[in-house]
Amino acid sequence: MGAIGSGGALYLNEHVIEALRISRDDVMAVAANELHELDRREALYRDNRPRPNFAGATIILADDGLATGASMHAAVAALRIENPARIAVAVPVAPLQAIVALRSQADEVECLLTPTSFYAVGSWYDDFRQVDDDEVRELLRAAAAREPPAGGPHA
């Protein structure tokens, strides 16, 4: 029915909410619960590292695929608040309607495959295991330890 992002970004799929007759109170209650989980993950994943400065930067948001696009809508909205120069979205697979909807928000959207019959992102992978918190933390720690590119972090 929607997704949330950092800084209070909220994307609601009004068609789903109306079709399922979900009350605004229920939507807001779910959003509040998910916000607690988002805050927990951000604190855990950041591991006392400062929040990056995205102002003036070119941001590339990548995902393993989009089903409805709700989470990517929320991610783009959360980053727009930070005033980046550009936001590009890159995904390997998504339904065409999700890509079309994102083009109104992101500066660029690239998708390799837009099948006419789309069931779930995982159906396009041989191995679609979930990544746990420890693995995410280790990957972020390793990335933070690398040297920034010549010209600074936004080069």
Image (cartoon, rainbow, N blue to C red):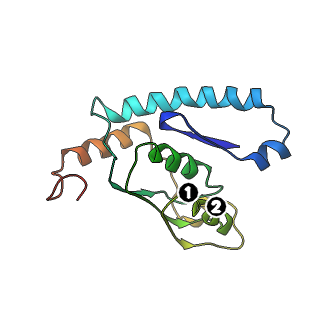
Residue drawn at (48%, 34%) of the image? 7
Residue drawn at (53%, 34%) of the image? 8
Residue 32 location (% of width, % of height): 61, 26
* Lateral position of residue 3 relative to residue 86, left or right: right
Residue 145 location (% of width, % of height): 19, 45
Looking at the rendered structure, which numbered label has been put on residue 105? 1
43 above or below 153? Answer: above
Quarter of the rendering containing residue 58? bottom left
User: Between marks 2 and 1, how big is the CA–CA gap?
Assistant: 8 Å
Q: Is residue 124 or residue 85 the one in the foreground?
A: 85
Looking at the rendered structure, which numbered label has been put on residue 4? none
Quarter of the rendering containing residue 135? top left
Residue drawn at (46%, 42%) of the image? 81
Mark 2, other Cα within 10 Å: few <14 / some 14–19 / many ≥20? some
106 above or below 76? Answer: below
- Is the Cβ of the residue at disc 2 closer than 8 Å to that at disc 1? yes
Mark count: 2
Residue 54 location (% of width, % of height): 34, 47
28 above or below 87? Answer: above
* Lateral position of residue 3 relative to residue 22, left or right: left
* Lateral position of residue 91 relative to residue 147, left or right: right
At label 2, which amino acid type do we have? Ala
At label 1, which amino acid type do we have? Gln
Secondary structure at badge 1 equals loop
Secondary structure at badge 2 equals helix
61 above or below 33? Answer: below
Residue drawn at (22%, 59%) of the image? 155
Q: Is residue 88 or residue 148 the one in the foreground?
A: 88
Residue 49 location (% of width, % of height): 27, 33
Q: Quadrant of the N terminus?
A: top right
Mark 1, other Cα within 10 Å: few <14 / some 14–19 / many ≥20? some
Residue at which label 2 appears: 101
